[in-house]
Amino acid sequence: MKAAIFFILFPAFLFTQDVQKTVPPLRYTAALFSRGDSWDSTKTPNEQPHFLQHGKNLKKLKEEGKIAIGARFGEFGMVVFKSDNAAEVRSFFLEDSLIVLKYLNMELMPFTPFYKG
């Protein structure tokens, strides 16, 4: 009798459960920018050589959907990329003169949000 009840109720139980797809969380890499050896402290950021090209590179990366968020804080800049592959993120800056010529240092690290905004 218990077996009969089980076979009658179990299929109903299966169909009443919410089926949720498991979506893996996005993974990010943060690029932290600080002043490099070539930085001219007598000039503002916008006056630094190659700054315009650097801005165009970041704009292109944003338009391509590769950037989650970017900000300046104090004397630092940070850009969070929608990638957990540091080598890929580093490749975004291979031709960015501000980085290549050491006007800015770039440090890459995993970025793991723990609060949603």
Image (spheres, rainbow, N blue to C red):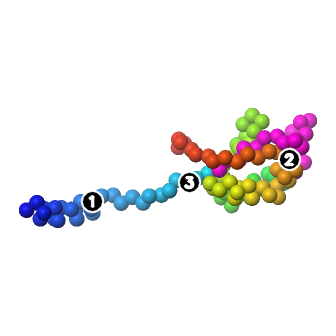
Label 3: state its secondary structure.
loop
Along the line of sight, the residue nearer the viewer: 18 or 101: 101
Report the residue at 82% width, 55% height from top.
Answer: 96
6 is within the stretch colored magenta? no
Query: Is residue 101 in view from this perspective?
Result: yes
Disc 1 marks a residue whose amino acid type is Thr
Q: Earlier in the sequence, mark 3 or mark 2?
A: 3
Q: Which residues are magenta?
A: 29-51
Disc 1 to disc 2: CB gap under 8 Å = no
* Discs 1/2, front: 2
Query: Is residue 59 in view from this perspective?
Result: no
Residue 72 placed where, x, y %? 73, 40
* Discs 1/3, front: 3
Along the line of sight, the residue nearer the viewer: 32 or 74: 32
Q: Earlier in the sequence, mark 1 or mark 2?
A: 1
Separation of residues labelled 1 and 2 (CA atoms)? 60 Å
The residue wearing badge 2 is: 102
The residue wearing badge 3 is: 26
Separation of residues labelled 3 and 2 (CA atoms)? 31 Å
Query: Compared to 102, does 75 lie above or below?
Result: above
The residue wearing badge 1 is: 16
| Mark 2: few/some/many CA within 10 Å (<14, 14-19, 20+) | some
Disc 3 marks a residue whose amino acid type is Leu
